[in-house]
Structures are given as structure tokens and as C-alpha cells.
Image (tube, helix red, strand yellow):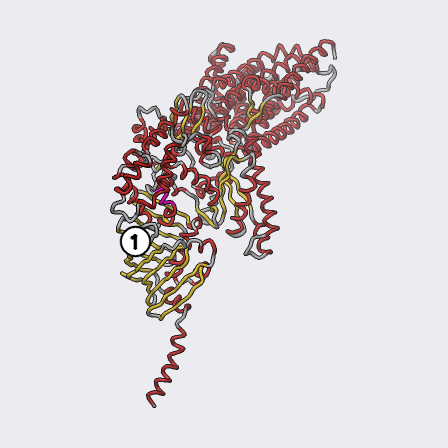
Amino acid sequence: MTAAARRTFLLWLLAMLAGAAIVWNSRFSADMSFFLPAHPSAEQQVLVDQLREGSVTRLLMLAISGGDAQQRAALSRELRARLADGPELATLRNGDQHSLDADREYLFRHRYLLSPAVTPERFTVDGLRSAIAESIDVLASPAGLLVKRLLPQDPTGELLGLLAGLDAGAQPNSRAGVWASRDGERALLLAQTTALGSDTDGQAAAIDAIREAFAAARAAAGVSGVSGVSGANAVTGFADASLQIAGPGVFAVHARTTIKTEVARLSMISTLGIVAVLFFAYRSLTLISLGLLPVVSGALAGVVAVSLAFGTVFGITVGFGSALIGEAVDYSIYYFVQSERGDAAAWRSRFWPTIRLGVMTSICGFGVLLGSGFPGLAQLGLYSLTGLLTAAAVTRFVLPQLVPANTPQRELGGLGEAFLRLTGRLERLRWPLVLLASAAATLLVVDRDELWNRELSALSTATAEDLATDAALRADAGAPDARLLIVVTAADRELALQAAERAGAQLDGLVTAGVIGGYDTPARFLPSEATQEARRASLPTAAELRQSLPLALADSPLAASKLEPFLRDVEAARTAPTLGPEALRGTSLALAVDTLLLPRPAGWSVLLPVRPPPGEGLRTLDADTLRSALAGSGALFIDMKSELDALYAHYLNEAKLLALAGLAAIVGLLAVALRSPGRVLTVVAPLLLAVLVVTASLHLAGQRLQLLHLIGMLLIVAIGSNYALFFERLGSQLQHEPRAVASLLVACLTTAIGFGTLATSQVPVLQALGITVGPGAVLALFFSACFAASPSPRP
Amino acid sequence: MKRLLVGLLLSVLAIPVLAAWDLAQLMDDLARTRGGKARFVETKYIALLDRPVVSSGEMSFTSPDRLEKRTLTPRPETLLLDRDRLTIERGRQKLSIDLTNQPEALAFVDSIRGALTGNRQALEKNYALHLAGSRDNWKLTLLPSEQAIAAIVQRITITGQRNRIRGIEYLQADGDRAVMTIEALSEQ
């Protein structure tokens, strides 16, 4: 190694070490934020907040199956006892009656501040008469048993009104005193994690804690057995018991695991495949190691650039890197195979300009992705751009200096000649190819409405099994999917609650009209101070009540003398302090308020989840009526699902524009570099034909195209242009350059291996990219060969 | 003398006939009913109130587990018991209760449903049964055996004629009681 070579190598090594240090300190993520917009609108911001930290994404649904109903109930209670006070879960509800005692106690104690029925009219003689008559009617009804005890304290029936507002109709089924699935065969529990939905580590910890607690609960119950069940049975029942967990957190954790293992698996497979190809090409360990140098440099530089620019590196981005290995290794292949006896200078003058142009077209293709509002795409773009530039630069400036002077090289000219004998005939395929591509284009135009998958779920990594479990448990639990949200914002908490109360008044009208089935609001459990003050002011003094009660009860079977507790409670409510969030502590209502009443960087937001009318699907919900009822109130109505789909549609449209812009940039670059429309056409035509054929094949194979297929098409052009440029450049001299042709073949093979490996991925994003670019690269080479200028006869 | 002998013989023969009418046979009679419709009047004696509260309406039963009680006066109200779910509708208010969460309601429902279907097993799960009277005028007393239920219901008395239930009295632990008289309208 010469001194210059040593210096270059040291510089390279230092750069690599610095890069490694940055990567070491980078944050990697595999959560939903891959899909979330970088610059959200007001509606999208709600969506982003909900997906990152909303209560919906903190919901975990647990189902215990096996054993009998008593055993499942025992496990459910045991699980709750073990987890309720743990740090991982904010709440764990299993429908056990006693777990609701605190809530009922809160509602009953503060009923005169909480009940919307509390108005001055309520406590006039007429108001009292009708309210108490109503309560006596209830007393005589089947529900009477439930209210009799409370009548002396609550003759106006405020608690019953409050409970009715809680929508008891949406409660899950029950068996042996705890929540159960519809068929009763599984016990159900609903948990809220303390960790945010976007905190995948926290979600994983919560899920692990639940699984551990369940295993411990099962072991403990199995030993002690349950009364009334014979010991042997009890033990088998508990041993059979199993736990299913579903919810957004499970999806996130599984997605991360999938991406992690996939990235490791794909990188290994493509590295092995490429090393095998290199071994065939070089038959030299030295050259193989040197050949991987630009790749390693490129991959590292890509992660460094993304980490520095975005702060967080998505797991998907790294996964994509495994495909890029196949592309980045091309440059060293060109160098090793094309240069004769290690003559770097000759190689630089003969081939480097073409390679440089190829690098530049690739960069045009990847570069336009930087402009994407979809953070995932922008990262892919930056990663690829940096990676390829680095790989090319290392090949050009570092590699030649490091190759030992007398490295034996394998002559691959024979391979090139064999291919050339074939291409001599391939030329005749030009017009059939044009015909084939025209057919493909026609198919795509005719079927243009069925080409695309327009749902965001196209990008989801959730497995069918996870989705099925989630759907089943959600249906059993009656868990709100919180798809429809009304959002109001205000400067502070009090104003936000007041705004929520105003919106609630309008929603009440819509509930009566049957437009919506119901809604949740934090103001139900924590009214604004103004409202509490108004209700308190409506309450009469004990002296006033003592006067009006006998009048109100004149014809009633209830004697005023029985209502001393009522007088006491009203008097207590008149002097009770205003309720604040701290009053809710220890109840599950606190969580309901916390998840719906949110502090924001500027002011407070209140979320009002809206339920569709009972028995009707979401489609029948009259969103326009809802919007017009809320018009002018500043409240925002959001349908999360359509918002997400709109977001994805926006990404898709943007990606279409970007792909066209990328194509235009590549054509423009070629026009400047080649200075001949004919030559540009020779380069671009085979690439476009390859794109058409691949796209039509995917469509025929039943794949619904999504965002990443589209990006794949751009990459076919960006990567394929390298081959097309070589063929165009060599043109009539093709026959004299079997080594160059062989280098293209090997390079194309490694690219196909890299992207082809991606095509086997379970991560839809990676699979779509791989299945498009892998075959596309091969076709681009093949078509470019067909369209290369006719070989001149041998001299 | 001969007449006396015949009389004696008849009475001897009659004893096994009378003795044969027991709980099992009542349950058999009841179980034969597939369902039907009836009018009811329910009077509730509540210590808190100076006068009893009277309500009336119609009820229908479809074996084995669907019972609908439609109160017409003083206020329309519908109670629907379908399997273990009890739904009460008053005006626009709808309350749905899972009975496994409500021991008091469950005790009541089990007694009514067990009696309607002649399900001795279901009745004996929660109550000790005492039968008195004859086939044409029987009185079945249910005394709760479980503590949780006994804390609410002291005794349930069901009276009837053959396979028809005529009345149900429901005595609560606090001394309040409800008396329901039932008049069949149709039978399936």
C-alpha cells in the first residue's frame, strides 16, 4: 500500500468511525409515525395527536378463554388485583361490580353539581312535584328495586338521570360477575396503558406485564383451586386457560418485531446472495471484501444522513437499505470487471463518465422523494441518495488505491460474449416489445379505476390473525373505535369545558332527532366552573325546601317527613366546593376526563367522541347535518377513518407527482448530457417499457398497487438508466466490450437479488418496492440490450 | 255397610292419587306450557310511601327464556328479559342490564322464569321450595338459600291453578312487598 493509499484509507476509516458514532446515538423507531404527515393540517393534527397519544391507541383488550365461567371470572379478578396498582396500566376494568363503586359514589355525592337537570325550575313546587312523581313511578316499576334505597336522599332522581347518560347499553356481556364475550366463552378486560400509543417500548412493557401477571394468576389459581369445583378439574381448567391481547399497542409491538426480524433476515439473505455472486465474479476474497467497501460506506452514510436530518430513523428505512446493497455494489463491480489489469486511469477515462451520469440519474430519481410530505418517503429518498453518492465516491476515489497491484482477476469476457451472441438476435424483439408494452399500457388505461388500493391499511404491517383478534374483541367489548370525533379548543381548561358544554347542548338535540346515537364528553363528569356555579345557585335553602316540599307532595303517597336526608344533601351541595380534576381521583371517570380533556401547547382541547345511531352502520351517519349543527361554534368534526384515507390519498397523489417530476428530471439530465433526442430516447424507451410491463404484470397478478409500487416504478427508471446508458454508450462497439457487458450482467444480478429479497418481505411497504424494482431492473437491462444500436459486423 | 266399604275403598284408592300430586308433577304441568299472554295488576307496598302503588299491564312469555312485561298504567314501560339481558324502556330512556351483575334482579328473574318453565333445577339452585294446596289451587313458596339473595328477598310466593300461575308475591328483606295478580289471556 502506498503512502497516498494509506492516507486515503485512514481518511475513509475516520469518516466511517465518525458515522458509526452517529449511528450508535441515533433513535430508531418502528411506529406509526412512519405514516404520519410532516406538516399536518388542523384536522390531521387531531389525527396525529390521537394516533400518538390518544386514549384509543392506549387501549388494550384482554380475553381469557379456557376453563369454565367461574374459573375465568376468578382469573379475571386475580389479574385485575395483580395489575390494577402496577405502573404499566392506568386502568384495568373487568366489569366487576365493586370496581364501579368509586364511580357511583362520585356521581351520587356530587349529583347536584353534575346533573344537567338541576335548574331553578327543578326546585319550584311544580318542578319538585313532577320530578318526585317520576321517581315514585320508577319505584313502582321493575327498576324500582334499584332506586328505593336512594329515594329519601335523591327524590328527584338525579343519579338515575346521570347513570342513563353513561350509555349502559354499550356495556359488554357479563358472566359470573365479570365482563365476557358475546358467547360467554371468554372473560374480557379493558386496559388503558400509562404509556402513550406511540411509545412502543412502553406498550411492549405493558403487554409483557399483563402476560406475566396472567401466568402468575393462573399458577396461583391452579394451586388453590376454586370453591365448588373439584380440585383436579380446577387445575386442568386453569392450566387450559389462555390469554389473548389485542389493541393498537399489540399491532405496534408486533410491527416492530416484524420489521426488526425482517430487516435482519433480508439484509442477511441479500448479503449472502450478493457475496455468492461476487465470489463467482471475482474468485478472490480480497476483491470481495474490497467490493463490499463502497456498500458498507454507503449504507452507513445513508443512516447518518437520515439520523442527522430527521432525528429519528425508521426501521423501514433501514430495511430498504438491504435492497440498496444490491445497487451500491454495482459501482465496484463496474470497476473490477471493466478495468483491465487494475488500470484505474484507463477505466476512469473510458467508463467513469457513463457511471457518473448513471449515478446522477439515480440521484434525480431518489432526490425528488426528499420533497415528499410523507416522512417515510423523504427518508427513503435521503437514505438512497446519500448511500449511492457515497458508494460511487468510494469506488472512484478510495477503491482504486486499495486494490493490491498484482491481484489476479477473473476474465468474465466469455460471459459478456455469450450474452452478446444472444442480444444479436434480441434486437429483432424490439417491435414485439413495443407491442407488448402497448398492450400493457392499454390494460392499465382500461383498468385504471381498479389499479390502486386507496386505503391506508395497504401499508399496515398488521397480520390477518392480529386483525381478526382485534375485531373480535372489539365487537365483544363494545369498545368504541372512536372513529368520529368532535374537537373543540379554547385558551384554558375552563373555557374548553364551557365550549364542550355548548357543543354538547347542540349534540343533545341531534341525539333527540336520532341523527347520532350519543356522545361522550368530559363535562359530564367535570362540568365547567360556570355551570357548577349555576347549578349550585339553583339549589334552594333548607328553609325554602321545607316550605315547598309539603306543597309539592300534597297528593303524593310520599310524605315530606321522609325526605330529611334530601334536605341535608341539598344543603351540603349548596356549600360544597367546586369540583376540579382532583375530585375524580380514584375513579375510572378520571381517565375518561383525562383522555378527552387535553392540554395543548396553546390552550386546551376537548374531544367529544360521537356514536352512530344504534343498529346502524357508520355510513348512515349524517355527517352533513352534524357539521351544519356545529357550524359557527368553532367545533371541528373529524371522521378518523376517512381522514386517514384522505391522508393516504394525498400521499398517493403526491407520489404520482413526484414520480413524474423524477422522470422529467432524469430525461432533462439525459438531454443535457447526451445532447441528442434520439440518444435520450434510446436510453429512456426501454426503461418506460420495463415500467409498463412490470406494472401490468403486477395488476394481472392481482396486486392492488399502492404508494410503494409507484415509488418502485420511479426506481426502475433511476436504476435501469445505469444499464441503458452503458448500452447506449457502447452502442456499435458493444461487440468489442464483452467485459463491460459482463459487468452490467453481474451488477444487474446483484440489484435483482437485493430488491428480489425485499419482495419476500412480510412488511407490505418493503414487499411492494421489491416486487416492482427486482423484476423491473432485470427487464430494464434486457430491454436496453434489445434497444442498443445494432452491432457493427466484426472487423 | 257396603256403601261404607266402597267409600273406604275409594278413599284408600284416592290417597295415592292425592299423594302423587307433588312438586315434580307441578313442574311437569308448568313445563308443558310453551308460552302465553296474560294481564297483570301489581300492587307494591312500600314502607316509604303512605299508600300502595298500583301498576298494571300485559305480560307475555315465550319458552324458555323470553319474558316481556309491558306496563301500561300509570306510566308506559316495557321490561324485556331475553336470556340474561334485561332491558327496561321508559319513554326515550332505555336501560339495559346484564343480570349476572344484578343479584336482586337475577333472583327475581330466576324465580319467575323457573316457575314459568317448570325448571325445578333452576329454582332449587337459589331457593328452598315448599309446595302446599292441591293441583287446582297450589301455593309454591320459595325461600332463598343464598346469602346474597336473602339479603334482598325474604320470600317469594307463587300461587296457581294447574299449569297456570295466578299470582306472585314478592316479600323483600326490608319488609316491602309486591303482589302481582295474573290473568291469562291466551296460551300456546
Residue A690, percent across and down? Answer: 49, 25
Q: Nearer the viewer, residue A579 or A431?
A: A579
Residue that numbered label 1 is attached to: B52
User: Does residue A23 show up?
Assistant: yes
Q: Is residue A21 above or below residue A525?
A: above
Residue located farthest toward the front when viewing the structure as drawn = A543
Q: Three-letter amino acid code at disc 1?
A: Pro
Q: Based on the displayed image, in which of its 4 quarters is residue A229 positioned? A: bottom right
- Quadrant location, the C terminus of chain A: top right
Q: Quadrant of the N terminus of chain A?
A: top right
Q: Is residue B54 magenta?
A: no
Magenta region, residue range: A150-154
Q: Chain of mark 1?
A: B
In the rendered image of this protein, does residue A563 appear above or below residue A353?
below
Q: Which residue lies at the image location 58% right of the left edge and 55% below the top edge?
A: A233
Residue A362 is situated, as x and y percent measured from the top left of the image, at 54, 17
**Disc 1, SS:** loop
Q: Is residue A152 magenta?
A: yes
Relative horizontal placement of residue B2, taking residue A222 as reference (left or right): left
Q: Is residue A61 above or below residue A489?
A: below
Q: Residue A256: x, y in percent?
A: 56, 31
| Magenta part, dominant SS | loop
Image spot of residue A141 (x, y percent): 32, 50
Q: Which one is in front, A362 or A351?
A: A362
The outermost residue toward the bottom is B1
Local packing at callout 1 (Cα closer than 10 Å; few below 14, some 14-19, many 20+) is some
Pick whichever, B44 or A222, lies toward us.
B44
